[in-house]
Image: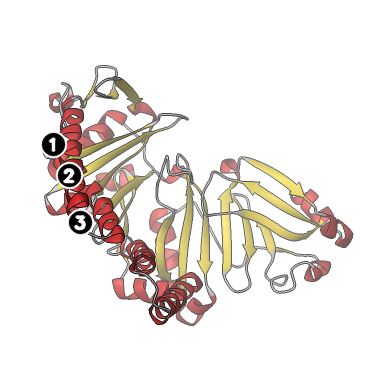
Amino acid sequence: MSDNFSRPQHTAPLTPILQLVNGSPIVLVAFFAVGLSWLFLLIGVIFLVVGGLGYWASWRKIFFWINEKGELEARSGIFFRRSRQLRISRLQSVDILRPPVARLLGYSSLKVEVAGSGHSRVILSYLSVGKAQELQSEILSVAKEERTFTQSAERGNYWQWRVPNGRLVASLVLTTSTCFLIITSAATAVIALVAGASPVALTLVVGGSVISLAGILSLFNFSVGRNERGIAISHGLFTTAHYTVSPIRIQAISLVQPIAWRPFGWYQIAINVAGTDQSGKKQGPRVLIPVVHEDALPELFRELLPSWNLEKEDEWLASATSSRWRFPWQAARLAVSVTPNLFMVRSGALTRRLSAAPHERIQSIRITQGPWERKLGISRLHADSVPGPVRLNGRGLGSSVAVHTA
């Protein structure tokens, strides 16, 4: 282990300023919403001074290092001291995040997550980019992780795929949610102007649109590749995120194709990753790639997930004929398939989905049947995975077929 991080040290000296700048936009929005005045300006100045002193005092009590037990230890707190030790041997991910202002000044945050419940995450804000990368490499070195791609990487066999920004924008515009957002925002703005609405209402409309636009921009410059640590995912225009995911952490995947994408042959690959959840406490990548042409899918799976074999000619167990009364629009698409390695589910009428998970990564199997389904003699077969966007629910199956498949 390197001596660079074996002794307690602070985050970057500019950390208090960067934290203060991150909180300033909230104050500015509040000023514009209630109207500018000398009183509110004075309150704003007091807020900045007090906040700056608080951030500075807090920064002086922040220390981190890698101790002799191979743990990342972080201490903080002014009045109530907090100490957290993360066992690097149980490392799940170590990611570099670069918010807009920090990115302009050459700083970033380092997020470290380990397996386990509760306080299993540490975010070090802020470090210089070089120091963050050095600490990331040190943590990965201490972890001594065995990755599927290690032998290939040792031969210099790296691989990367980039998503063209033009295709990304076009694909997002062609999704139902984005079209609905654009129409709703435009209609609300016009109605607010005609009806003489207050600037506060317009601010809310513009704010909602900006937040949605920020979500789109967060996927700009999207790239996915393979390195010596696993699958590397990077994206973001103003705020950049870098994730390194071990292939064994990917528990389920889904090929998603909205109806407007079909003429172009585009798909999105959504993933469930172990060690993340939807509450925001443990965030991670939700998509392996936001949009890709169907011709590139074989290469993507061959390079990134070679053990996942999603062959279209696999034998499918179609839904029962009576399921048309319960699922009239998509009964023809509903089916499940069980291969020696994977459990796969096909669904969707307007938005088609092909979801899959290896047998050993399925947490449990359930069969459910509502009153209407009981009358039709059909059931649902659920394969439970970790939290994420992928759902493995085989609907419309004949009850005997569902029991036999389970």
Question: Which of the marked residues, 2 or 1, is nearer the chain's N terminus?
Answer: 1
Cα distance in 3D space between marks 3 and 1 = 35 Å
Q: Which mark is residue 18?
A: 2
Q: Mark 1 points at which residue?
A: 12
Q: Which residue is drawn at 21% across and 29% down?
A: 58
Quarter of the rendering containing residue 207: bottom left
- The amino acid pointed to by label 2 is Leu
- The amino acid pointed to by label 3 is Ser
Cα distance in 3D space between marks 2 and 3 = 26 Å
Q: What element carries label 2?
A: helix
Q: Residue at x 84, y 55 (%)?
A: 371
Contact (CB < 8 A) between labels 2 and 1?
Answer: yes
Contact (CB < 8 A) between labels 3 and 1?
Answer: no
The spot of residue 182 in percent (x, y) is 42, 75
Q: Residue 308 carries which label?
A: none
For this orientation, the residue located farthest to the top is 68
Q: Which residue is drawn at 86% across and 59% down?
A: 377
- Give the answer, above or below, for where 33 lies relative to 365: below
Answer few, some or many: residues within 10 Å of disc 2's Cα (few below 14, many 20 plus, some between 14 and 19).
Answer: many
Q: Mark 3 points at which residue?
A: 37
Cα distance in 3D space between marks 2 and 1 = 10 Å
Question: Which of the marked residues, 2 or 3, is nearer the chain's N terminus?
Answer: 2
